[in-house]
């Protein structure tokens, strides 16, 4: 037999699936993969159920049902003042994951360069490579995650075709500032490059931080594709409904990519998401306030254990430096260890880098019920304060020398 695709052969199973499986095996609280542990809004569940029963269950229009395309256009005006043609500038996809791939497919030819910012979401790099394009990586580093402007500028060149930007950012919790976005916008215009904006956490920002779509910056509207996800905005990650807003000239290519990937997205879910996007401002404010409270509670718990918790302005995720706990294995060992021995799963931050990366940070998803977050802190406290040495695996025991710090 000939070998299968070499890039896929070299691609491992995603860390989110691996850690979720490990969490199940060890009955650990799963703060790894980012998904809420409560259902989305009941009225949306009812709308999806009702929509199943009214006889529109065959292929919907390829770019999305009219109700949802109109709702996406309306949300663009309402939240960002962006005026959007619902018929020509919106493409509904099966999740933001598909949208990201479709947008990359829409603009990249083999040999084109795509600028990506590390730490990066797990699908970006494999998809860019599968398209035969050349990734140009620029890295943000903890604890401040500042944009290294000179390096970013140096990553742009005559072959740059696109930049893929994620703000609010997974896993860092960073929300790009107006000044950073202006710097990026200038580079894109000078190099005549496209922007693909993964904005799935657009409504999950805290402490007065506001998400600014790159698309709203002067001159960027014609070259920007903006991606949203109902999974994040409505706590319905299993639904996999995403939406791209793009100028008509680009949206037609995104639609053709979608045509070749999934073609359409379940119509009942699309219609329920349309009702969700029409929710009043209190819903969106409440979602963020609720998550901010969880973040604060869990951050205080981790800090109480002695971890150094980094600021989080948006997203589902907190990153903590676990080195004060005295665990001297790397982040992958730490996350495996706390899953198996403490019963709490997290994601090692180094997986979001393509090559050598900071090794003492773990990402915790805080989009969970408060009792669950409290129990996770209790388990970690019990493990690291009372019985750390006894429960360590042989592999990491010798490295574990320092006593855990108390609050
Ligand atoms: N976006 C989620 C996370 O970062 C996971 C999604 C997935 O499992 N593919 O945790």
Image (cartoon, rainbow, N blue to C red):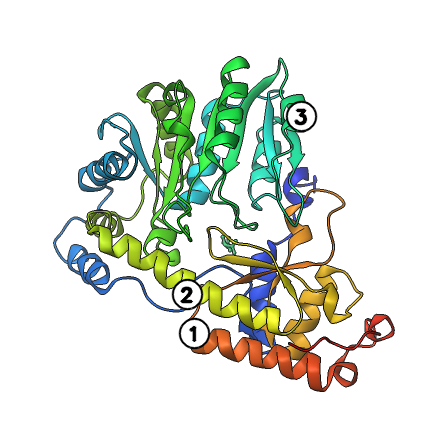
Q: Position of residue 228 (x, y in %)?
A: 37, 42
Residue matched to label 1: 370
Q: Can residue 236 be seen in this view?
A: no
Q: Is residue 93 visible?
A: yes
Seen in the picture, residue 370 relative to 111 is either above or below; the reply is below
Q: Which residue is pictured at 56% across the width and 66% down the height?
A: 20
Q: Where is residue 241 in the image (x, y as percent from the top left)?
A: 34, 47
Q: Residues within 10 Å of mark 1 (few under 14, many from 20)?
A: some
Residue matched to label 2: 293
Q: Which residue is pictured at 25% across the width and 56% down the height?
A: 283
Outermost residue on the left side: it is 54
Residue matched to label 3: 150
Tell me whether circle 2 and circle 3 mark residues in contact (CB < 8 Å): no
Tell me the quarter of the picture where residue 132 sits: top right
Q: Distance of mark 3 from mark 1, alpha carbons?
A: 42 Å
Q: Distance of mark 2 from mark 1, alpha carbons?
A: 9 Å
Does the residue tagged 3 have its C-beta within 8 Å of any atom of ligand 1? Answer: no
Question: Between 173 and 230, which is closer to the camera in this rendering?
Answer: 173
Which badge, 2 or 3, comes first in the chain's sequence?
Answer: 3
**Mark 3: which secondary structure?**
helix
């Amino acid at each position: 037999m000939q070998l299968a695709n070499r890039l896929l052969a070299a691609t491992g199973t995603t860390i989110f699936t691996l850690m979720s499986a490990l969490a199940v095996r060890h009955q650990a609280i799963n703060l790894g993969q980012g998904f809420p542990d409560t259902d989305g809004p009941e009225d949306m569940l009812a709308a999806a159920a009702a929509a199943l029963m009214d006889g529109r269950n065959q292929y919907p229009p390829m770019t999305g049902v009219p109700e949802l395309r109109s709702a996406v256009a309306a949300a663009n005006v309402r939240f960002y003042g962006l005026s959007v043609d619902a018929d020509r500038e919106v493409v509904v996809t099966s999740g933001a994951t598909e949208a990201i791939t479709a947008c990359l497919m829409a603009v990249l030819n083999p040999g084109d360069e795509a600028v990506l910012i590390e730490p990066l979401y797990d699908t970006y790099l494999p998809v860019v490579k599968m398209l035969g394009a050349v990734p140009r990586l620029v890295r943000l580093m903890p604890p401040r995650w500042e944009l290294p402007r000179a390096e970013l500028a140096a990553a742009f060149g005559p072959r740059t075709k696109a930049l893929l930007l994620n703000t609010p950012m997974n896993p860092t919790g960073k929300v790009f500032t107006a000044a950073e976005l202006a710097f990026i916008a200038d580079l894109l215009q000078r190099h005549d490059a496209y922007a693909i904006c993964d904005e799935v956490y657009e409504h999950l920002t805290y402490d007065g931080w506001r998400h600014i779509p790159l698309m709203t910056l002067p001159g960027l509207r014609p070259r920007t594709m903006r991606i949203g996800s109902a999974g994040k905005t409505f706590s319905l990650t299993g639904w996999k409904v995403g939406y791209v807003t793009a100028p008509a000239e680009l949206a037609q290519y995104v639609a053709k990519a979608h045509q070749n990937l999934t073609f359409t997205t379940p119509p009942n879910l699309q219609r329920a998401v349309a009702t969700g996007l029409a929710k009043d401002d209190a819903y969106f404010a409440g979602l963020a306030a609720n998550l901010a409270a969880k973040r604060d509670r869990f951050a205080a718990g981790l800090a109480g254990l002695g971890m150094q918790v980094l600021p989080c302005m948006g997203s589902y995720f907190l990153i903590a430096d676990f080195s004060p706990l005295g665990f001297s294995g790397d982040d992958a060992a730490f996350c495996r260890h706390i899953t198996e021995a403490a019963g709490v799963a997290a994601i090692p931050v180094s997986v979001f880098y393509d090559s050598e990366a900071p090794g003492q940070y773990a990402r915790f998803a805080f989009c969970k019920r408060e009792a669950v977050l409290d129990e996770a802190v209790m388990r970690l406290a019990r493990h690291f304060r009372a019985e750390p040495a006894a429960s360590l695996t042989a592999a990491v025991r010798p490295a574990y020398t320092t006593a855990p710090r108390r609050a």
